[in-house]
Structures are given as structure tokens and as C-alpha cells.
Image (cartoon, grey):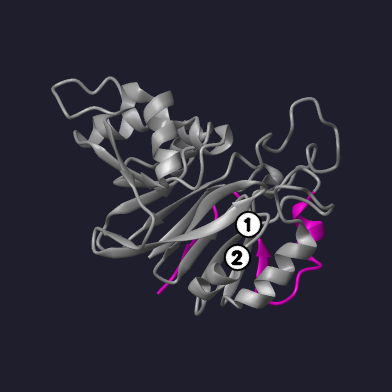
Amino acid sequence: MKLTMLGVGSSAGTPMVGCKCETCTSSNPRNNRTRCSSLIELNNGKTILIDTGPDLRLQSLREGLTQVDAVLYTHTHADHLHGIDDLRAFCYLQRRQIQIYGSHEAMTHIANKFAYTLREPSNYWDMPTLKVNPVNTAFEIFGQTIIPIPLKHGNSDIYGYRIGDIAYLTDVSTIPESSLRLLEGLKLLLLDCLRYKAHHTHINLEQSLRYAGLIKAKSTYLIHMTHDIEYASLSAQLPPDVYVGYDGLKVAVG
């Protein structure tokens, strides 16, 4: 499998509008962060997108993305959902409906707020053509087992996902003990790391490193970062096997 980090930024993105801090004015392209999303390419050629942030169109153009076969939703905050309309491009290119997956709450939210996207295939592809699939236990798509990982995001119950030896955990405030057991033996972990200071709905750097030490993935990449985090500065202080993610980074997992 191969994972592409489409975006590793927080809800405001980096650079932030109107900000003149060191990170926002940096010439290092690894400090340019679009809203958080990743793409997984399976060995059979199928692709699984995780979340549809508002930068999906730009991310797709940047990466030359022309295929999305399924979408996993972690939760329904705007920075993870509101690019859903841009799935219409992939429905048009592929001439087929795209299956989307998430918690019952997330699928109900999408059905209520984006009802126009839930439609059966026809001769017209001018809108997204999607089908919701609520999940609460391990399920299989394209021959690959997907395990929802229950997480806390402040007071909200959301999902991370384990796909083979890859796990994607964004917008985390707490990882329950039962979920930690689902994360044993990972080769690649993408893990929330909002900023240096504590936050009530996200883990900060100290907490991210503690969880990385508990999970013990072969490689851990930090994602969903604000402009408080400058790429080179943080990279220089991380322990072995923990890295700062950046937009466009590709990681193969054998």
C-alpha cells in the first residue's frame, strides 16, 4: 500500500490568512499545510480517501489525483467534510457511485446536510453520486479490512481508522485503552499534533509523543498542525521514528 498525505494542516490551514509569524511567512514549502486528509492506494489499484476537506480540489490537482473509489469519514467538522462536493469530479471521471463510510452519526449528518449528494447513478454526473454506509465494527472494502478506531475529540465520539498496518488518528483528545489495543503492530501511524500548548479537543506535542511511545508504530508522522509548529524546528527535536508530516508526502507500506 501507499499513503499520500494530501493535507496535514488544522482548520485554518497554514499560512493563516493575515498572519505574519515565522511559519506563515516561511519559504520552506513543508510549512504550507492544507486541511487534513490522506489517500491510501491499495495493492489492487483501488484508492481510499480519508475525509473530504475544503482543499480537496487543490490537493487533487497538486497530486494528479483522478481516482477515488471510497471515502472514510472520521467526523463531520467542516475542515474534514466540506469538500464533499468535489467528489463529483471523480464520479464524473469514473462514471460510478462512490461509497462513503463512517459512524452512524456522521452518515446521518451527511444525509441531512448534503442530501443532494446521495443519489443513484444516472446519465448525469453534474453532482456527487454517493451512498452512505454506517459502520461500527470492522468491515471490508476491495478485499481490505478496515477497522474503525473509537476516539474522543473533546466531547465528541469520532473514528480513526486502521487499514492493514496503517492507522490514521486525527482530531484526538483521548485514545481509549480499548482503542490502543486495536493499534498494536502498526508500521505507519498518522497522529494528531495540534500545537505545543494544551488544547481541550486535540492532543498537543507532549501528548502526541506519549501516545506514539505507547503505540510503538514503526514510523509515526504528526498531522493536523497549526502554524504554531514550524517544520524544521520541530523535526530537529523529535525522537527516532517520529516525523513531521507535510503535504504531498508519500509513504509506502509493504
- Residue that carries the numbered disc 1 in the rendered image: 245
Q: Amino acid at mark 1?
A: Gly
| Front label number (2 vs 1) | 2
Secondary structure of residue under mark 2: loop
The location of residue 190, given as percent across then percent down, is 57, 61
**Which quadrant of the structure image shows residue 192?**
bottom right
Q: Which mark is residue 87?
A: none
Vertical comparison of 186 with 197: above or below: below
Q: Amino acid at mark 2?
A: Pro
What residue span does the magenta drawing correspond to? 229-254
Taking the image as shown, residue 224 lies to the left or right of residue 89, namely right
Question: Closer to the camera, 220 or 172?
Answer: 172
The location of residue 116, given as percent across then percent down, is 32, 21
Q: Earlier in the sequence, mark 2 or mark 1?
A: 2
Question: Closer to the camera, 237 or 208?
Answer: 208
Vertical comparison of 200 with 12: above or below: below
Taking the image as shown, residue 11 lies to the left or right of residue 167, namely right
Secondary structure of residue under mark 1: loop
Q: Which mark is residue 176?
A: 2
Q: What residue is at 33 percent from the left and 30 percent from the top? A: 89
The location of residue 45, given as percent across then percent down, is 27, 57
| Res. 187 in view | no
**Which quadrant of the structure image shows residue 212?**
bottom right
Quadrant, the C terminus: bottom left
